[in-house]
Image: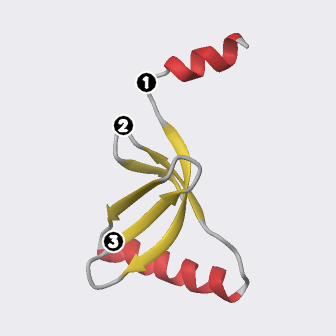
Amino acid sequence: MEFILENQNDESAVDLFMIEEIDVEKNLLVLANYIYDKKINYPVSDEEMEFYTDTFDIAISKNIFLFVEYDEKKGIIIRA
């Protein structure tokens, strides 16, 4: 129980967010966390967009959902 309480007071707020949509025209990933009812529009570079678009297309063809670790306090994706 102490571990859980320590994590709740930790300054980082890293959660899993699903990549719900990719907006190629605006270079945005739409990240969703349905547990906490949150959506984030996350801007990416052209290179990152190419990576996420290719990965997203493969995932859709295999009926797989893509998740990223997103740090809300820092506003960055930790791990894709």
- Residue 9 image point, x, y percent: 50, 18
Neighbourhood count class around disc 1 (C-alpha, 10 Å): few under 14, some 14–19, many 20 upward: few
Q: Which residue is located at x 32 percent, y 67 percent? A: 44
Comes first in the chain, label 2 or label 1: 1
Task: Name the secondary structure under disc 3.
Answer: strand
- Mark 2–mark 1 CB contact (< 8 Å): yes
Task: Name the secondary structure under disc 2.
Answer: loop
Tell me if 60 is positioned left or right of 46 in this view.
right
Neighbourhood count class around disc 3 (C-alpha, 10 Å): few under 14, some 14–19, many 20 upward: some
Q: Is residue 70 above or below residue 64?
A: above
- Which quadrant is the N terminus positioned in? top right
Distance of label 3 from label 1 (alpha carbons): 26 Å
Look at label 1 and name its amino acid: Glu
Identify the residue position indicated by label 1 in the image. Answer: 11
- Residue 3 image point, x, y percent: 68, 16
Identify the residue position indicated by label 3 in the image. Answer: 28
Look at label 3 and name its amino acid: Leu
Look at label 2 and name its amino acid: Lys
Q: Is residue 26 above or below residue 3?
A: below
Identify the residue position indicated by label 2 in the image. Answer: 73
Distance of label 2 from label 1 (alpha carbons): 8 Å
Task: Name the secondary structure under disc 1.
Answer: loop
Distance of label 3 from label 2 (alpha carbons): 19 Å
Q: Which residue is located at x 56 percent, y 56 percent? A: 34
- Mark 3–mark 2 CB contact (< 8 Å): no
Q: How is the image coloured?
A: secondary structure
Q: Which residue is located at x 57 percent, y 78 percent? A: 55
